[in-house]
Image: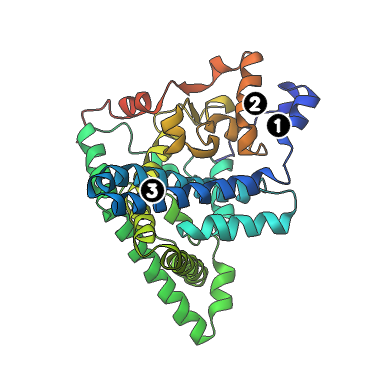
């Protein structure tokens, strides 16, 4: 099918406004990564201190810490997403490094393969060629079905299935490299690693066999970052801060990732000729911004309309669209609870 119709910014924004919202800062992307890791450190070490202070304080602090950790882990994935669009830094090499290592590798994703995968999603949003179509196609569904997914996420089942699949493909990649066929496999791979920061209906979407080498490199970076985090945890405090980070990665991160994925496209009218219907923007309060909507990812309609806008400029893009009278054409939800109510309107089990 043909690619979805794109919006023309020249007919929507004044030249000076367009220049302002598409400007890629030399420091904001770096500051966001530092912010994410600062919150991770404060949450993990804060909860560890609470346990040392009193067991009751630890019991209260741990759920809060897991929520904040999962939210910043999602935030790191979002910042890798910005890097895939070249929006973390104006220097291309530094942009790619920032998206590959301090953001993407921390959650087990690969920038280069994600970029190819994700740009295909933008080109064919909600069309049969869209690699993310499986994320929105099952909706609307029943509350019971959604709750089953929530339980799988919060009990680590989704994480376990995804990592088993990812590590299995990585092992194939290592074997291919040992056979000397790694370069050939890597050249044929275009989407390696990308399904592991997305969730299909069953929580797992495996890359093709030829992607093993790229997945092996992704897993290698992931394990290296985990080793560094564990070493820092042991050096500064002990095992508990890292254990909390890993537990969040296996639980709250998976749930927040799912909710964010649902909110972006589920039950929208995407597929029409109007580019303003290709995604949903969801208003987010403080707690939502700390968990399911870090770094302005909730302005997803604006991102699909103008994917060259850095995440920190999406609120301004939203405001300018409102001033121009375009909000009425967009899919906008008042909050994430409203989205979840909408996508569970079906009695289907």
Contact (Cβ within 8 Å) of mark 1 with mark 2: yes
User: Horizontal and vertical percent for residue 287?
Assistant: 41, 32
Q: Which of 349 and 48 is in front in this view?
A: 48
- Quarter of the image with the C terminus is top left
- 230 on left or right of 1: left
Classify mark 1: residues with Cα within 10 Å, few (<14), some (14-19) or many (20+).
many
Residue 241, disc: none
Lower sequence index among marks 1 and 3? 1
Q: Which residue is drawn at 43% across and 71% down?
A: 170
Q: Which residue is drawn at 26% across and 55% down?
A: 157
SS at circle 1: helix
Q: Mark 1 points at which residue?
A: 21
- Quarter of the image with the N terminus is top right
- Disc 1/disc 2 C-alpha distance (Å): 7 Å
Outermost residue toward the front in this view: 53
Contact (Cβ within 8 Å) of mark 2 with mark 3: no
SS at circle 2: helix
User: Horizontal and vertical percent for residue 344?
Assistant: 28, 29
Outermost residue toward the right in this view: 15
Classify mark 3: residues with Cα within 10 Å, few (<14), some (14-19) or many (20+).
many
- 200 on left or right of 88: left
- Disc 1/disc 3 C-alpha distance (Å): 29 Å
Q: Name the residue under label 2.
A: 316
Lower sequence index among marks 1 and 2? 1
User: Horizontal and vertical percent for residue 145?
Assistant: 23, 38
Q: Mark 3 points at which residue?
A: 253
User: Horizontal and vertical percent for residue 47?
Assistant: 35, 49
SS at circle 3: helix
Lower sequence index among marks 2 and 3? 3
Q: Which of 44 and 285 is in front in this view?
A: 44
């Amino acid at each position: 099918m043909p690619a979805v119709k794109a919006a023309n910014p020249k007919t929507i924004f004044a030249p000076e406004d367009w220049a302002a919202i598409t400007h890629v800062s030399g420091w904001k992307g770096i500051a966001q990564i530092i912010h994410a890791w600062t919150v991770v450190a404060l949450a993990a070490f804060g909860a560890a201190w609470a346990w040392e202070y009193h067991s009751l304080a630890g019991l209260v602090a741990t759920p809060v810490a897991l929520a904040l950790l999962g939210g910043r882990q999602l935030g790191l994935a979002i910042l890798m997403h910005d890097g895939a669009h070249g929006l973390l830094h104006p220097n291309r090499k530094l942009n790619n490094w920032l998206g590959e290592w301090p953001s993407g590798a921390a959650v087990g994703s690969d920038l280069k393969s994600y970029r190819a995968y994700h740009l295909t999603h933008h080109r064919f949003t909600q069309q049969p060629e869209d690699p993310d179509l499986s994320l929105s196609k099952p909706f609307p569904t029943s509350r019971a079905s959604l709750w089953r997914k929530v339980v799988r996420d919060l009990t680590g089942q989704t994480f376990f299935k995804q990592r088993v699949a990812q590590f299995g493909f990585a092992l194939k990649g290592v074997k291919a490299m040992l056979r000397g066929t790694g370069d050939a496999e890597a050249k044929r791979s275009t989407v390696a690693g990308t399904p592991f920061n997305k969730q299909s209906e069953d929580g797992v979407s495996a890359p093709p066999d030829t992607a093993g080498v790229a997945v092996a490199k992704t897993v290698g970076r992931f394990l290296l970052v985990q080793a560094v985090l564990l070493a820092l945890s042991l050096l500064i405090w002990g095992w508990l801060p890292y254990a909390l980070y890993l537990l969040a990665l296996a639980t709250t991160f998976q749930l927040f990732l799912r909710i964010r994925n649902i909110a972006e496209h589920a039950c929208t009218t995407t597929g029409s000729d109007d580019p303003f219907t290709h995604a949903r923007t969801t208003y987010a309060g403080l707690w939502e911004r700390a968990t399911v909507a870090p770094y302005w990812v909730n302005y997803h309609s604006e991102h699909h309309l103008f994917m060259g806008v850095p995440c920190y400029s999406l609120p301004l893009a939203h405001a300018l669209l409102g001033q121009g009278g375009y909000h009425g054409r967009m899919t906008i939800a008042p909050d994430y609870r409203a989205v979840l109510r909408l996508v569970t309107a079906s009695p289907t089990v």
